[in-house]
Image (spheres, rainbow, N blue to C red):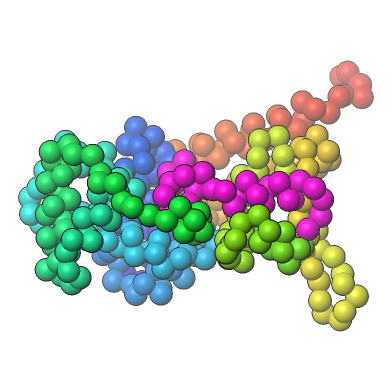
Amino acid sequence: MTEKEFDLHYRHLKEQGKAKIEAGHAWLDQEMAKLFDTCDLTQEQIAERVGAIEGKSISRPYLCQRLCFGRFLDFVARGNISGIWLPGLTEKLFRRHYAPISKRHPRGKSGERAVFEEVARALEQGLPPEKKARDAAEEEQEDEIQDGDGELVNRSGRPSPIKDAVCEILGTGWQTSKQLQSAMKKQIAGVKPEQIRNTIHYLKAKPPEGMALEVKQFDTGKEGEDVKRYRLVQQDQCSPVDKLVKLLEPIIVQLEEISQMHAAMMSPVMVGILATRLRRALHSVLKEEKPSSVC
């Protein structure tokens, strides 16, 4: 599989995951894990391709978790293990079983096989995941990821405290990345610059309800040096043109991605969804403008 084929397959799976609502999050989790496990690309190549498509860096723990889930699904398929639990198995549920069980087994292929067997038995018997003792402070500092609903959460699946803190700070006015990082350190010890960058990228697409993230490029006066500043404002403070640009930008990006796909990979359902989103975006802005005259 070439990198271009991987990109096409990855984007196609994301579209199908949105379209197949009835399949739920488990379908997308399992198909992504299978793609990662069978694509014949190195971990570095997978991280690079996914990062380029998603527009943000992918952490090694996140990648390793998906690869492990993919190996488990392959183990289940090769062992002819079937059960009512498989269609609803998400990566998160698998990880909640896998993490504590793996502590009791040695590393390596033989140890992993024993872990997979025990996880499969637990799922088959409907046993709840074993509780894993963790340090709460360490858990709060984990890398932020998006769950199946696209919401920003930490690795434990809890709402992101970093996102809440960033929103609070950006709500006070313009902030550079350095200013934001300095303010964040006072609220959450050990926060990483990468976590802040990922959160800002997330807020561009999904700001808090009724809010909008504004970005401006400021000239520092030094040759060749510009600094971006960010702030969160109420949507009613944005001009109609700004609102329209913010609403249309992600739709245009997705349409451009579809245009680069092979005809066999294109999803008519996704095009229909984007058309509906485009119509709603136009109506949401136009209905706020009072007509100057009646035709």
116 left or right, relative to 260: left
What's the residue at 13%, 62% (across, down)? 113
Q: Quarter of the image holding residue 197? A: bottom right
Q: Where residue 47 sits in the image (x, y, percent)?
A: 43, 68
Task: Based on the picture, tell me whether residue 153 belongs to the magenta stretch.
Answer: yes
Q: Where residue 267 sits in the image (x, y, percent)?
A: 42, 45
Q: Which residues make up the magenta segment?
A: 147-175
Is residue 201 among the parts visible in the rendering?
A: no
Task: Based on the picture, tell me whether residue 131 belongs to the magenta stretch.
Answer: no
Q: Where residue 174 sits in the image (x, y, percent)?
A: 81, 55
Q: Residue furthest bottom?
A: 223
189 left or right, relative to 145: right
Q: Where residue 196 sits in the image (x, y, percent)?
A: 62, 60
Q: Quadrant of the C terminus?
A: top right
Q: Quarter of the image holding residue 117? A: bottom left
131 relative to 196, above or below: above
Q: Quarter of the image holding residue 183? A: bottom right
- Of 131 and 222, nearer the camera is 131
What's the residue at 33%, 60% (across, down)? 65
What's the residue at 26%, 64% (across, down)? 38
